[in-house]
Amino acid sequence: MQFGIFTVGDIAPDPTTGYTQSEAERISNIVRVAERADEVGLDVFAIGEHHNPPFVPSSPTTLLAHIAALTKQITLSTSITLITTNDPVKIAEDYAMLQHVAKGRLDLMVGRGNTVPVYPWFGRDIRQGVALALENYNLLHRLWREDVVDWEGMFRTPLQGFTSTPRPLDDVPPFVWHGSIRTPEIAEQAAFYGNGYFANHILAPNFHFKPLVEFYRDRFEHYGHGTRDQAIVGLGGQSFIARRSQDALKTFRPYFENYPVFRGSSLDDYLARTPLTVGSPQEVIDKVLTFQEGFGDYQRQLFALDGLALPVELALEQVELLGTEVVPVLRKEMAARRAPGVPDAPTHATLVAAKYGDAEPRQPRPNPNRGDNLSGTSPYQDSAPEFQARFPSAA
């Protein structure tokens, strides 16, 4: 079971002081939060992609590459990579490069994005959002698994004899989660490929996403990837933690009540109706255990806890409490309740082992005798004869 943080990199005035972080401060503070998450033993740090104010992470790969250089163990991910407004060729190249830079400590979450003005900024039509998401991911999937791709679709120019570079680390693509708020087509696509499905699980009533998760599990089994209980599921969550419940409520209330998304809402009502938890470590633990009861065993739990204009010192304290007082208990409790045979979330190491067993991973090298890659044959030479002997079809 993986635990971590996901953030959208929002900026808003601090309702207790009136101070608004600059973009430079917010970016620096995101890095500090990621470093602290690594230090306290969290498993995942994920950053969203946004191209409009008041959000700053327009280039997740740049930010995550910097974080990769400063951290040691934590898996870096996204929440979301926009599969609709980004060219899948550029996604393939950028995230393969980041995978190399991070030494395999990378996966990503792809999704549509639902900010209407962003689509025309990138020459896209939001009314085609689902079709874009499906077609672009289908191409991305091939670009990471085939050295040479011939392709033609509706939304970009055709490809002939195209090779995306660099090839994925160890010739094993990053694991992909598909994130969706309301679209069964995205859950269907995740199930078709045997990828992971991430339910946002915030800003909505408790277990609002259960029908989509159940649909994904059923389709995962339908496509022959395993039983429905072996499907790879991730959930979001939102929390604010203090050692005493009354202190958590007192501190968090002004941030909740003055944030644009929640303005006019009752914090107490929101706590009762949604996955948001504000309270002691034990209260957060108890709430998350209800997720396991409602959704079944799952592989990844991410928390949103550095937004809503929280000052960085308060956000770092949240990371500390999550990593030292909440997650250790959740690991133990959720493992004890876990059914036999439920897989862990894939990592680069487990994906490499699944593909190669005891053989050396393929390390693609461009073939110096090939001046082009238009013939439809691989422009790469294999570095290990033993790999060719064991996997001749991949040579």
Image (cartoon, grey):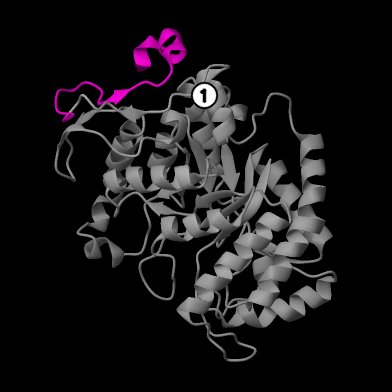
Q: Residue 291's spot in the image, x, y percent?
A: 68, 47
Query: What range of the chain is rendered magenta?
Result: 371-395
- Picture residue at 47% right of the left edge, 47% below the top: 101
Looking at the rendered structure, the kind of residue marked 1 is Glu
Q: Quadrant of residue 293?
A: top right
Q: Is residue 264 left or right of residue 291?
A: left
- Locate the N terminus by quadrant: top right
Q: Residue 294's spot in the image, x, y percent?
A: 67, 43
Q: Residue 116's spot in the image, x, y percent?
A: 31, 65
Q: Is residue 311 left or right of residue 59?
A: right
Confirm whether the magenta stretch covers residue 53.
no
Mark yes or no: residue 206 visible: no
Confirm whether the magenta stretch covers residue 381.
yes
The relative height of residue 203 versus residue 143 in the rendered view (above or below) is below
Q: Quadrant of residue 259?
A: bottom right
- Locate the C terminus by quadrant: top left
Q: Secondary structure at mark 1?
A: helix
Q: Residue 369's spot in the image, x, y percent?
A: 21, 24
Q: Nearer the viewer, residue 162 or 341?
A: 162
- Picture residue at 41% right of the left edge, 52% below the top: 81
Q: Nearer the viewer, residue 335 or 376?
A: 376
Task: Characterize the local packing of mark 1: few (<14), some (14-19) or many (20 or more) Cα atoms within 10 angstroms.
Answer: some
The residue indicated by pointer 1 is 221
